[in-house]
């Protein structure tokens, strides 16, 4: 069964850090681009970051550049998102997703992804 499972979310104070994990099963991550998205209440899902498998290229949304870092561990079939210098506006459910190879789209377009995890809640609050 093709599946993505996120973990690592939680409650953290402003300025704190978290590391999110996205574990894959049923397929190998190193053959796909994997993206991280987030969705806050009442807002649309937005792209946070993506890592390609073919050229290793990495993308970040402007609002997380310099604060978040995406990486992958092919041996563990897992992609990570390190969140540093967290702000209240980073509060959201964070999802990882597998890029649909048959759909050409901008990296941050959620329609370009065919497998999604269930999400992990990140809450930044004092």
Image: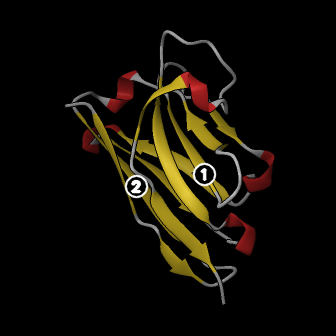
Residue depicted at 47% across the width and 74% down the height: 10
State the residue position of label 1: 38
First reached walking from the N terminus: tag 2 or tag 1: 2
Q: Position of residue 105 (x, y in %)?
A: 66, 18
Above-or-below relation of 18 to 50? below
Q: Which SS class for mark 1?
A: strand
Residue 101, numbered label: none
Q: Residues within 10 Å of mark 1 (few under 14, many from 20)?
A: many
x, y percentage for residue 106? 69, 23
Residue 2 seen in the figure: yes
Considering every residue shown, the one lying at the far front of the view is 42
Q: Which residue lies at the image location 41% right of the left edge and 66% below the top edge?
A: 8
| Residue 67 to residue 105: above or below | below
Q: Position of residue 13 (x, y in %)?
A: 62, 85
Instruction: Kindly give the residue lying farthest to the right in the view shown.
Output: 62
Q: Which residue is mark 2?
A: 21
Residue 78: quadrant of the picture: top left
Residue found 79% across the figure and 53% down from its top:
63
Q: Nearer the viewer, residue 55 or 1?
A: 1
Front residue of this view, candidates 106 and 76: 106
Find numbered disc 2 in the image and state the secondary structure of the residue it sits on: strand
| Residue lying furthest bottom | 126
């Amino acid at each position: 069964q093709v599946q993505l499972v996120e973990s690592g979310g939680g409650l953290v104070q402003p300025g704190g850090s978290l590391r999110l994990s996205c574990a894959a099963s049923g397929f190998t991550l190193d053959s796909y681009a994997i993206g991280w998205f987030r969705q806050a209440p009442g807002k649309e899902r937005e792209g946070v970051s993506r890592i390609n498998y073919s050229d290793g290229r990495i993308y970040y949304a402007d609002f997380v550049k310099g604060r978040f870092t995406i990486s992958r561990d092919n041996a563990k079939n897992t992609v990570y998102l390190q969140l540093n210098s967290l702000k209240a506006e980073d509060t959201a459910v964070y999802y990882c997703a597998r890029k649909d190879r048959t759909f050409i789209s901008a990296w941050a377009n959620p329609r370009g992804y065919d497998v999604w995890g269930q999400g992990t809640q990140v809450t930044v609050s004092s």
